Image (cartoon, rainbow, N blue to C red):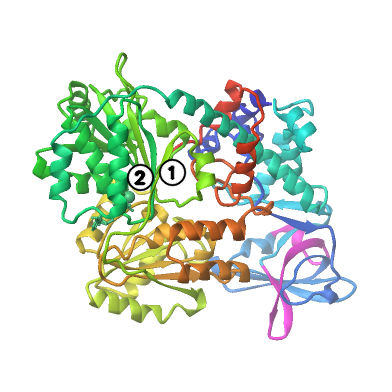
Amino acid sequence: MYDLFAQPLTVIPGIGATLEKRLMSRGINCIGDFLLHLPKDYVDDRHVMPIASLQEGMDARINGRIVSKQARGFGRNRQVMIKLADETGFIALNFFHSGYMMTDARLTEGREISVRGSVESWKGYLQMNHPDWCVMEAYHPGYRPVYASLAGLGGKRISTMIKQVLALLPTTAASPLDARLASEFHLPDLRSALARLHGPEDADRDLLEKANVRLKSEEVIIYLHLMREKKVAADCPGLTLQREGLSEQLLNSLPFPLTEAQTTVWSDISQDLHSGKRMHRLLQGDVGAGKTWIAALAMAKAAGCGYQAALLAPTEVLANQHAETLAELFAPLGLEIKLLTGSTRARARREMLAELQSGELKLIVGTHALLTEDVHFKQLALALVDEQHRFGVRQRWALADKKREGHEAVHLLGMTATPIPRTLALALYGDMDLSIMRGMPPGRKPVETRVIASSKMQPLIGGMQRILDGDGRIYWIVPRIDEDEDGLSVDQRVELLKGYFPDANVIGLHGRMKSKDKHAALEAFTTGQCTILVSTTVVEVGVNVPEARLIVIEAAQAYGLAQLHQLRGRVGRSSDQGYCMLVAGPETSEGSMARLKQMVNTHDGLELAEADLAMRGGGDAVGTRQHGDAGFRLLNMSEDAGLIRQWFENLPEFTPSEDMQRFWRPFAESTD
Ligand code: ADP
Ligand code: MG
């Protein structure tokens, strides 16, 4: 099976080099990857409705004859109106910006077509706007998967291509786990599971759920095996970092004393580092709990002992910020720290690499650019990984693997604000010890949180003005980079807000921008030259701008509570009152609304994570997310907690083959 999965995308009819490149840039590298682009929904398209029985709000399939076709308007704005009739009645179909339809021979009067769309009412008449249509012969009743578009490929084309890919897998293609999971757990084999999810014969949700569980089980089991291997490999002697002066000097020069929780964690870590055994510890602490100072202390300790330390961050934005914060903390100690990212100039990079190799440079912070093979250390004592849930297992260890031949193993300190319940953490990060840092630095007020409907956003403008008048700054989070009809893209929001706040110097920030521009945008927001920052969730991880007092999150229903909590953690980072507005889109269900309201009264990350688990945990067979957390391809930490735990406690004995590992692992990459 896995050798078949590895075939290049170009074996799919219709995919050439250009499209392949585009798909690859989205992490779809082979036909197996393409198959993991699961339907986002299914439509029951078996029944044709008589037009007379249609009612407003229905999603319906109708077949009929074209009675008339008219166009209104000119050029791009040309609107086409088709009147469609069956034996029971007639209905109007509107197509905007669709002048080309006037000359389409398949749409001449008297022709029969099949249409699917939602029924709307206008001045008392029923109509459909922009329904899907095809000639009558092309309509095949059935239960139909609906795909999210991908790299510019529309859902319909994806659907056709997926069918072609499935045809490339002979029925004999098998996964090494098939027999085991079938006999002991009554799960379908991998090939049938894929076939069912992509082309269900019926609406049987149980069977879909089973297929989904089968697919995810493959991923969990391989992951857990890897963790087990790592745990065994991680237990080994490590460098002993003795008492030294630098970390103590830093401790005394911090602007505020450590909180109790910070003190405890720092003592755990110091003990590990003294112990002579390698540390592999995960530091879990809520957003804003002050993990960076702990990282700084550990780094100072490594340098104080004459060794090196490196801090890995998932995004350039965050790496930049860490470099600045740490440089400030280290300057009085005479300690230098440098920044290495994908956009570091070749010359500066060469110099830095030489200094790391000679040991002249002790401390470095960077993105995954730190992980490339030509980065060598004289003697790395400590690897730190911030927001480690954003990295895959392999990357998490890659930095620590940069030890030189003959040296002791490198200590590893992971940090995360993702509050995951302990049992789940043990399964997911089974290769590490766990330190939990509870509480916040003193003087913080909980962020005042409100949920509002997107139709009621107008009053927000006044509130924003008051924040700006009080010298506060505002984050505005949108779900998308690309423009769409709903206006929820970065550029569209920047335009809109500029209109309301001409003096705020509104700036946009998103992951696809050049790193120089990203840095400039964040810099402008940090210094207050810009006071409203419109951004995608790239700011989610760790950015610290204490003057930010309000965060507006559009399409909030689309995020998990843990992620919303992280986003909310961007404000309330000083003694000023912080505010968070969760804007629920028009399609938000009552259940999602109730989920969002949890945010209003709950300010503890762990509690929210558990609520999320309880409310969304399990059962979501169909709403399969495309890519989950932590570099998982299908698994979603909150939805699949039960499944992860189940396999953790009952892991089948088997050794994942090379190609299985290769297939499930490449996504173990950071997101920037
Ligand atoms: P996170 O745990 O999310 O990484 P940070 O390390 O960014 O949090 O810390 C958030 C803010 O709290 C920073 O502005 C930092 O200077 C401040 N801070 C950290 N520790 C303390 C402390 N003990 N007392 C007061 N402020 C602190
Ligand atoms: Mg942080």
Which sits in the foreground, 440 or 219?
440
* Disc 2 and disc 1 in contact, CB within 8 angstroms: yes
Q: In which quarter of the image is the N terminus?
A: top right
Task: List x then y, in percent, for residue 323.
Answer: 22, 44
Does residue 553 show up magenta in the picture?
Answer: no
Residue at 32% of width from left, 52% of height from top? 261
Which sits in the foreground, 419 or 252?
252
* Element assignment for label 2: loop
Residue at 62% of width from left, 37% of height from top? 649
Which sits in the foreground, 270 or 204?
270
- State whether residue 185 is above or below residue 490: above
The residues bearing labels 2 and 1 have C-alpha atoms spaced at a distance of 9 Å
Does residue 118 show up magenta in the picture?
Answer: yes
Mark 1 is on which residue type?
A: Arg
Question: From the Cβ of disc 2, is ligand 2 less than 8 Å away?
Answer: no
Which mark, residue 315? Answer: 2
Residue at 45% of width from left, 77% of height from top? 457
> Residue beneath label 1, please?
390
